[in-house]
Amino acid sequence: MRLVFLGPPGAGKGTQARELARELNVPQVATGDMLREAVANGTPLGREAKAYMDRGALVPDDVIVRLIAERLAQPDAKRGFILDGFPRTIPQADALERLLGDLGVSLDRVVYFDVSDAELVRRLTGRRSCPKCQSTFHVTSNPPKHENVCDRCGSTLVQREDDREATVRKRLQVYAEQTSPLLDRYKKRGVLRTVAGEGKIETIHGDIKKAVNG
């Protein structure tokens, strides 16, 4: 299966993509994780991306496309993949089509996560991350055993700059302006499926499997 998960920041794409990728035995290709790793490692692409991420703006297409092209060229992606966080703009969708065309494959499904803005703000502003091992927690729905301390490695948890409320609202605005047009594109092509992104994780996962196979 070659899938795209679409949805605003905080919609739960990453959690669901990880589980489904495990079940399908295909890689989860998460642009957010790839970018944060590049930033943490201080790579040229990471330094370039950081200035945009810190203010909630989208990272330029050429940076994202280079990361994705390298990832899809790896052997494990030949069986299929779940793209999590890409494409986010029409130009990125065009670039993805060119990439897939070069590989001789096409998308099977595009799954859109429908979540209210109020719920997205709650989820994102309450998120805490470990700068060392990249574990994530939430102050209400998934708190660490000890306040502000990572369960896995004991490091002090932080609130990422792009999870602060002002930046979150900016990210949602950017998403609505630049990413929502993708829904019309994929709907016209008959590959778009919409699932409700609020509720029990297990219920959402079941809905996604129905959407992917239906």
Image (cartoon, helix red, strand yellow):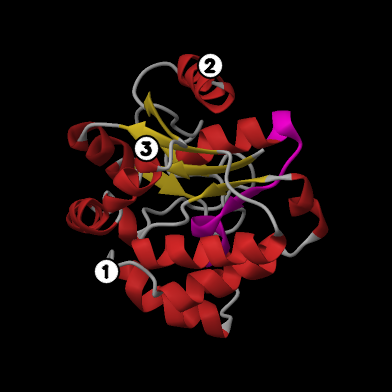
Residue 135 image position (x, y, % from top left): 56, 46
Task: Tell whether label 2 touches label 3 (CB within 8 Å).
Answer: no
Task: Tell whether label 1 touches label 3 (CB within 8 Å).
Answer: no
Assign a secondary structure to mark 3.
Answer: loop
Inspect the image, locate mark 3, and give the three-letter code of the amino acid beneath it.
Ala
Judge whether residue 32 is colored magenta: yes
Q: Going from the N terminus, do you reach mark 1 or mark 2 first?
A: 1
Residue 5 image position (x, y, % from top left): 48, 42
Please indicate, yes or no, whether residue 36 appears anywhere in the rendered image.
no
Q: How far apart are the two marked residues, 1 and 2, measured between alpha carbons? A: 35 Å
Query: From the viewer's perspective, is the residue at label 3 or at label 2 nearer?
Result: 2
Is residue 214 found left or right of 89 in the rendered image?
right
Q: Which of the pair 152/40 is nearer the observer?
A: 40
- Count neighbours of disc 2 (C-alpha within 10 A) and say few if under 14, some if 14 to 19, many if 20 or more: few
Inspect the image, locate mark 2, and give the three-letter code of the amino acid beneath it.
Gly
The mark total stands at 3
Residue 101: quarter of image: bottom right
Q: Which residue is mark 1?
A: 55
Judge whether residue 79 is colored magenta: no
Q: Which residues are magenta?
A: 22-35
Q: Which residue is mark 3?
A: 11
Is residue 6 found left or right of 169 in the rendered image?
right
Q: Which residue is mark 2?
A: 206
Residue at image position (35%, 61%) is 89
- Placement of the C terminus among the 4 image quadrants: top right
Q: Going from the N terminus, do you reach mark 3 or mark 2 first?
A: 3
Residue at image position (73%, 65%) is 73
